[in-house]
Amino acid sequence: MSENLTTADFLAHLHSQGITVWADGQNLRFNAPRDGFPPALRDELVARKTEVLAFLTSDKVAPASNGVPAKAAFAAPRTPLEMAIATLWQQLLGRQQIGIHDIFFEQGGDSILATQTVSWIRQTYGVDVSLRALFTDPTVAGLAHHIDQAQQAAQTTQLPPLQPRQPAASGAGDVLSFAQQRSWFLDQLTPENPF
């Protein structure tokens, strides 16, 4: 490869070869074509690692449309809560296996299924987790974290039970609200009117 190629030109050349490069923290990841990664391009990529990494993290190049980051290894649910969420998603999404880092929307989830998930959480665990929480943190682990936070908040802000109101002292009469007073007055004014 020519030494005077800019980083953008080099990345465009890689893309034309069917290779997509993206930054993952301080590492470069790439999606190579099925017939292999040409050694000359691999050497050039290693030589330009710092330059390419800086270029990719500056958001000046949009990710390639055909490049999909490699999936992380399957991580099984660790807690009963994560297991329950993963089982629900398996049913909703028709999947055999859902890991704690699998992204809900990449597995086939949509806004309707997200709403069903939030409703299930409310019915099953008695806490409200916002739909926004699922959209911003769409993994089993993330959703379990939101449920845990909501449960902890519910325990710390638990209100005392309601006490029945004591009847007024004898002869004092019950206190009526303004709407009740108005209804009573209208009934006294026109008793034959059902309204």
Image: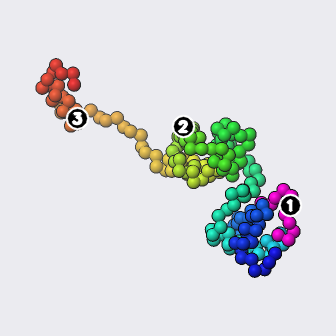
The numbered mark, 2 or 3, whose residue comes first in the sequence reads: 2
- Return the mark for residue 36: 1
Residue that appears at 83% across and 69% down = 42
On the image, the x and y values in percent for residue 62 come to 65, 64
Residue on which disc 2 sits? 123
Quadrant occupied by the N terminus: bottom right
What secondary structure is the stretch in magenta mostly built from? loop
Report the amino acid beneath label 2: Gln
Residue 96: name its quadrant. Answer: top right
Q: Is residue 39 magenta?
A: yes
The image shows residue 47, relative to residue 121, as above or below, that is below
Start-end of magenta stretch = 31-41
The numbered mark, 3 or 1, whose residue comes first in the sequence reads: 1
Q: Is residue 107 magenta?
A: no
The image shows residue 176, relative to residue 24, as above or below, that is above
SS for dot 1: loop
Q: CA distance from mark 1 to mark 2?
A: 51 Å
The image shows residue 190, relative to residue 28, as above or below, that is above
Residue that appears at 68% across and 73% down = 54
Report the amino acid beneath label 1: Gly
On the image, the x and y values in percent for residue 187 come to 17, 25
SS for dot 2: helix
Residue on which disc 3 sits? 179
CB within 8 Å, label 2 to label 3: no
Front one among 109 and 186: 109
Looking at the image, the residue that sits furthest to the top is 192
CB within 8 Å, label 3 to label 1: no
Can residue 86 be spotted in the picture?
yes
Front one among 181 and 67: 67
Give the left or right position of residue 92, taking residue 170 as reference: right
